Image (spheres, rainbow, N blue to C red):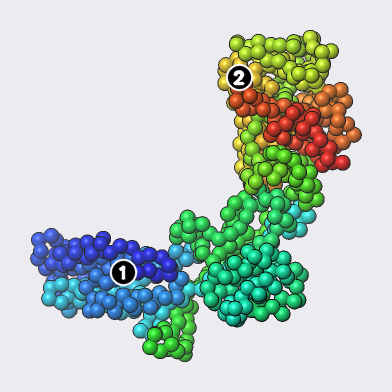
Amino acid sequence: MTLGGKPMQRRGWIAAALTVGLLAAGCSPGGGDGSRGPTPGVESTSAINLPAADALTKALAAALTAFDVTLLPVEDPAAAQAELVSIFAGMDGITPTVTVGGIDYSPTDPSARAKLTFTYALGEQGWTYDTVAPLKLVDDKWRIEWTPTLIHPQLTSDSRLRHQRKLPRRAAINDNLGLALVEERTLYQVGIDKSQVPEAEWAASAAQLAALAEVDAVQFQAKVAAGGPRQFVVARTMTQEEISPDVGKVKGAQVVPTTAMVPVSDTFAASLLGIVGAPTPKMLADKNADVFSSDTVGLSGLQARYEKQLRGVPEIRVDLVGRKTDDDATAGDAFEEENLFLQDASAPVAVDLSLDRDLQTKAETVLSTQPGLAALVVINNSDGALLAAANSPAAGTFPQATFGKFAPGSTFKVVSSLAMLRGGLTPASAVKCPANLTVANKTFKNYSDYPASKLGSITLIQALANSCNTAFAAAAGSVTPEQLHAAAGSLGVGTDYDAGFTTNFGTVEPNNSPIDRAASMIGQGQITMSPMGMAAVAASVASGKTTIPWLVKGKQATSTAQALTAQEATQLQQMMMAVVTDGSGRSLAGLMKGAKTGTAEYGTVGAYKTHGWMIAWNDKVSVAAFVEEGVSGSTSAAPLIKALFS
């Protein structure tokens, strides 16, 4: 037996509880010797001796909670169960948890009254009330006198409970100008009502409507044929403007309004915004979630994280209404309804983002033809606002731009440079850049076309501009893992923050082995970053302060790292500017003031593939470009930045 689609609990444990209750019917409330004594708390001096009814009332509460009273000692268990079902027929499967609050034994006759507490998982606060269950002692055994007031004090044989719930219009997610990126709108389901068309004409109507709705005619005809004889078969959900006026000429065609969350496009910031849809089985099983199968809820991204804010509070009411029966379908129509429980609705609140609609759209367009996984992230230098976070189609719905975990390669040398500056170097300090460097049993080399003129003794600024691996790997001996982590923190990465959306600020945890410390200095080893994280490094340098990217207004994270000093910022700016004027970032001259290329090896030993990276900044914004399977930063990632800002 089921109620509102939810299966009843098994009756075996109810029967066990009831058996205990009946066996205990001869026990005194105040003792365990089987004698009948006065009930504690009863003031009357003429009280009669009654056995305890505690076990039976517990069995009653358990049976009501399980929604199965057929095993209780009532006059007609089947009739009691039928009335219970009738009372809750309009409650949408919502049933109470029932507990016993105490028993009041009569001082003058063999009866008692058990206090029951009914609790419903309804709305924000829930609904709780008390009832009284009348008990009668018959042949030394307690029996329950079934009555509708046992379920609610105001119920009668002519009334029942009815639950109603109305969700407010779901709030929008807005861009940085306050314009909706995704909002609830009225759409229209265009389809064939098969009950309005003779079966012989189903195929013809389906073909006509398919042409007007611009869907595949053969597939829609098959869909119509497969449905039931009275089914409404949807061809397409459309906006009002998309519906042809000729739809009304198709026999059996109908247009049914519906609501849906409509984004700017199917792909626009999809991994960030997330999707809405029907609740999952897990959500429906959570009694405290206040979710119904007919609801539309956030399932991922910002839609899920800010579900409560976007959804608002629904109006929920439980009313006492007339009870209808199979014998008289009109019975109860004249009953005067009375409200028993009411939760007022509260309006949802929009989520305002930092995203720049035009820049995000262009970034997605740039990546739309990019083979494999790639990403572009743009941050506003002045306040750290995330202006764009786009992925190539290969990313699917996974937020690689903000949550991906990849070796950043030589772009991380900006962080290493800060650690070296804090160790006493300056941009003009001399460092050694040999062609090869052996650390333990590992040989570090420069990239294949590294300029020979920049080998030997060069300045730190030249080492960064030309991306000398061996110079930075050699510096690992004077930079501890803790110092490298601290430098990363000052540039916005390496420390996890709750930034209000799905983020990865990177991992900077080199171990103490000489090889890993050397590899970490060039963005390999135990170093992983997201494209957003590396954009934050560029933005921190450009702005001269530690920058933690933010997306949701009011959810900005505050840095806990050592502050970047003005001198450090100036030195790093000079070094990154040299990458554009004299190094591997020359292709960005005129678009960007400072930059850093990066190439990182990954995959199987002996068959390594390479990530291509580029981070850059100008007076207004900072950007990170990432290509999972690239050739190099200047070859694979730089063209994406040029396309975005040209």
Residue marked by disc 1: 68
Identity of the residue drawn at 12% across and 73% down: 140
For the residue marked with disc 1, what is the amino acid?
Asp
Q: Which mark is residue 516?
A: 2
* x and y percentages locating residue 197 in the rendered image: 61, 80
Mark 2 crowd level (few <14, some 14–19, many ≥20, 10 Å Cα) = many
Identity of the residue drawn at 79% across and 12% down: 455
Q: What is the CA distance from the residue labelled 2 to the residue labelled 1? A: 66 Å
Q: Earlier in the sequence, mark 2 or mark 1?
A: 1
Q: Of helix, strand and loop, which one carries label 1?
A: loop
The quadrant in which the C terminus is found is top right
In depth, the one of 366 and 475 nearer the eye is 366
In depth, the one of 288 and 519 nearer the eye is 519
* x and y percentages locating residue 536 in the rendered image: 72, 36
* x and y percentages locating residue 194 in the rendered image: 58, 77
Residue 107 in view in this figure = no
Position of residue 293 in the picture relative to residue 111 (left or right)? right
Position of residue 604 in the picture relative to residue 118 (left or right)? right
Q: Of helix, strand and loop, which one carries label 2?
A: helix
Q: Which mark is residue 37?
A: none
Compared to residue 211, the image places residue 502 above or below, namely: above
Residue 587 in view in this figure = yes
In depth, the one of 431 and 5 nearer the eye is 5
Identity of the residue drawn at 45% across and 58% down: 285
- Image quadrant of residue 95? bottom left
Compared to residue 388, the image places residue 331 above or below, namely: below
For the residue marked with disc 2, what is the amino acid?
Asp
The quadrant in which the N terminus is found is bottom left
Identity of the residue drawn at 61% across and 58% down: 276
